Image: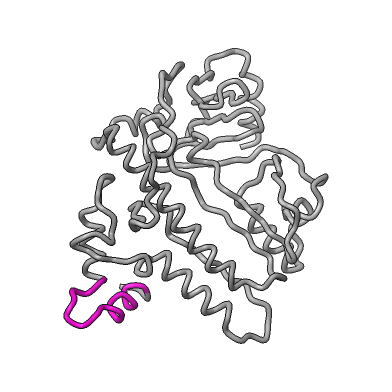
Amino acid sequence: RSAHSDWLTATTPPGDVDKHVRWLDFVAHHRPTSKPPDAAPWHLATEDQLDSYCARRAVEILRAPRDRPLYLQVCFPGPHPPFDPTTEFVPDRDPPPPIRGPRRGPVSPIELRYRRAPRRWTAEDIAASRRAYSGKVALVDHCLGRVLAAVDDQAWVIVTADHGELLGDHGFHGKVLPFESSIRVPLIIRPPGGTQGRVDRGVTELLDVVATIRGIAGREASASLVDRVRSPSSASPRSVVFANLGYVGLRTPELTLTWDARTGDPLEVFDRSVDPQQLENRVEDPRYRDPLRAGWAVV
């Protein structure tokens, strides 16, 4: 039970099955090829979605009277499994296909572990998931627009996410492997009054977002992105560390490197400057020994 489930129950028309019960049934039976939640037998509209509930509550808070500065973190659960856009947001055409092989070079033991998972996705599952994911992104974008419409022009706005989604790339779903679709996330920052749109090619990480919020609040924060937002010349590409189950990694502007978190043994080197789809693991290539040694010293 939650505030959302209470809302579903409270807004169920008399004589209908509790919308929360219908939601639980939808989730229990959801598969990549499932019908959308507004179809029979669930009949759950866009306004019943948890993302819509978060948007409504955020707008209520933003429009309420206040006598001090407000920090509001709006955590949309989508796009996240289950990928469940309502019919109005399901795209008419299929999104681009996933990245496929052939793969070259050693396969890391971390990846081998996930290859042994009992559940394997069919081509139909992957295509359906990518279509539903695209629809869920559109639904969240719609909800975000509702929140932005209630935001004061003098507010800072930061839009980001905690992880990506493989969506069938290299045959995997989820977020646990060090491919670009998993570890790259959106980051959009709008300062008060807006700014001319531009793309900053410098590298950032989620810790920079925390530092940026501190910087906006006037607190000391060495990794704040405030200056980079206000001045394009202040951008400085650098490397960032990431980690997941069993490995640690380093992403530089050109390379993605990983090591066994327990032993420190190198596992992978993907040179994205010549292999942007990460199809060849060059960990045994002697030309990458120096970057591996230097990278391990960083992580």
Q: Nearer the viewer, residue 294 or 62?
A: 62
When the figure is inspected, residue 13 is found, relative to residue 204, above or below; the finding is: below
What range of the chain is rendered magenta? Answer: 4-19
Look at the image and tell me in which quarter the N terminus lies: bottom left
Q: Which residue is pictured at 44% across the width and 43% down the height?
A: 165
Q: Which residue is pictured at 45% across the width and 52% down the height?
A: 137
Percent of width and height locating residue 285: 56, 14
Residue 187 falls inside the magenta stretch: no
* Residue 52 figure quarter: bottom left
Q: Nearer the viewer, residue 206 or 273?
A: 273
Percent of width and height locating residue 290: 66, 20
Tally of numbered tags: 0
Percent of width and height locating residue 78: 43, 56
Q: Which residue is pictured at 37% across the width and 51% down the height?
A: 90
* Residue 151 figure quarter: bottom right
Q: Which residue is pictured at 67% across the width and 41% down the height?
A: 203
Residue 18 falls inside the magenta stretch: yes
Percent of width and height locating residue 185: 55, 46
Q: Nearer the viewer, residue 239 or 230?
A: 230
